[in-house]
Image: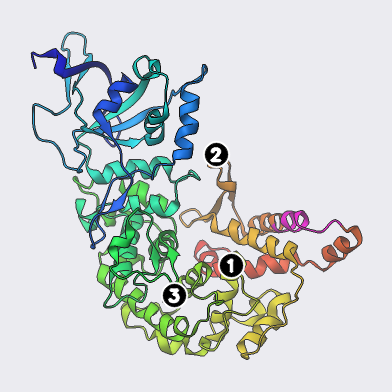
Amino acid sequence: MDNKINYLEIPALKVKQPLGDFYVISISARQLLDVSFSEPMKYIDNSGNVKGSQRPKDVKRLKEIATYIESVEMAFPNSIILAANYTENGELSKDKSERWKIVENIDDKSFKLIIPNKQKLAAVIDGQHRLNAFEFVTREDRFNDLQLVCSVYFDLPNSYQAFLFATINSNQKKVDRSLALELFGYNVDDESEKAWTPEKFSVFLSRKLNIDVEYSPLYEHIKVAPLNSEILFEKKDNTKWVVSTATIVDGICSLISSNAKRDRVLMQQKSFLSGRNREMIKDIKDISPLRTSFITNQDKTIYDVLIKYFNVVKELFWDKAIYKSYINKTVGIQASFDILKLILIKEKSNTPDNIDFKEILIPASNIDFSDKFFQASGIGRSRIKNSISIAINFTSLDKIKKRDIPFYEQLLSSKPTNTPTEKFIWEDEAENAVLSTLELLEWNYDNNTVSLLEFHDYEKIITFQKYDDLFLKLIEVAEINFAAYLPSDDEFSELQKENFDSEDLVRSCLNDYSENLIKIGWSN
């Protein structure tokens, strides 16, 4: 290391955090471009193994950022995150002569980062577009004079590189949620399956369902987010219906956790190298039907339940579905998971993989899911679930919104509904808003309360101590959204208001959460 020309020596600040220590440095754009790399996430083999953790390059966006870099008011105060000592092939470099090193000054406790110059041994975890935008920068001074802030992790495993990216970006619009979920389950072989969080477990099963040609009815039906996903399938059939990774992951998660984020945070109190396991969440009150199977590592049982159930769904519903049917669209798959959850709760079996799903679902096999009563929205999901649930005698008609009862009766009689040609979107939007609000609820079984993270604003949390308070809040949501979509004709609007039964709407929506209400000790 005597030849200083071959190395960069940069002052560094050490930062201690639970995931691990990292070092903050200031480095010129030119130097960083010389020693780092980033690439889009993509599949590299037919087993679903993935490489890379970044989004594909957006040239239009890169040019916009480049224009900003060249402006007189340019500022990038936030940090670019790097994983040092990884080659562009994703392998950890063990060559001592080329590895990044940190040197501590014993006298003043300061640190210095030693970087082999012009060798790309740092993977960009976050900050890809900021860095790649320099491809379109024409001002030479911006390369040499402009300093960028970087947070450097040493020897960070691939799975944690992807985890960091997903954690940083999963709540931002510009990152596809399915991609973020794929990243949470990135390279599952990096840790024992006993350490998998509900999210990671669900991602693993969604991948398995997508590539299991022998048993899975969802084979090739799950849209994978990374690039080059066509490598998974030698014969690509563009006529096949597909749903997103997020749809399947959410469905599986709902069977094992009522709050996957809570479980993940609790399990991450320990590293997977030092004792993280599923039993860490065994004392949390949770009514998810396959929760015990998940905690006790009965992974095959859970997979067998999914295979057996969805093969019946395929036989009874998907195989006879026409192009316009909603049963094999996102809302139909979501509703199918809802029905599976209802069946598992009702059966309360210690061997859920032995449940005769076909016998239970046969009474619903003649429902026409292409009927105009259904739609691709939250209401569509609810109506599909309700129609199946009523047909198999899991739900009675008196629990359904009064205005919709005639339509369900027609559907169950194998007749087309007389759904009005003109769509009363104001009532549909009110129902959609209530359903969306219910999905945001967190059921706190330990203290018999319900929390609402309103409008995804994590600083605005409403806590309900009793059923009536929650009910009134949902009434408010329904009425606000109902009014927002009413037409401008005052006379017509007043008539619609008189006919709108917000209490009936809310009560019917809450019927889906009867088990939650019972568990929490509230009566309705």
Specify the farthest residue to the front: 138
Residue labelled with disc 2: 459
How far across and how far down the image is residue 240, in percent? 42, 73
Mark 2 residue crowding within 10 angstroms, few (<14) / some (14–19) / many (20+): few
Q: Amino acid at mark 2?
A: Glu
Specify the farthest residue to the right: 491
Residue labelled with disc 3: 340
Q: Amino acid at mark 1?
A: Ala
The quadrant the N terminus occupies is: top left
Q: Is residue 159 magenta?
A: no
Q: Tell me which label, 2 or 1, sits earlier in the chain.
A: 1
Q: Tell me which label, 2 or 3, sits earlier in the chain.
A: 3
Q: Tell me which label, 1 or 3, sits earlier in the chain.
A: 3
Closest to the observer, 449 or 502: 502
Whether the residues at callouts 1 and 3 have beta carbons within 8 Å, the answer is: no
Closest to the observer, 428 or 475: 428
| Mark 2 → mark 3, Cα distance in angstroms | 34 Å
Residue labelled with disc 1: 376
Q: Label 2's element?
A: loop
Left of 6 or right of it: where is 75?
Answer: right
Q: Amino acid at mark 3?
A: Leu
> Image point 30% across, 27% down: which residue?
33
Where 49 falls versus 27 (above or below)? below
> Image point 58% across, 41% down: which residue?
460
Task: Please identify, in this view, whether the residue under mark 1 or under mark 3 is nearer the observer.
Answer: 1
> Image point 22% across, 59% down: which residue?
45
Where residue 284 sits, quadrant-wise, is bottom left
How far across and how far down the image is residue 387, in percent? 58, 80
Stretch of the chain drawn in magenta = 478-488
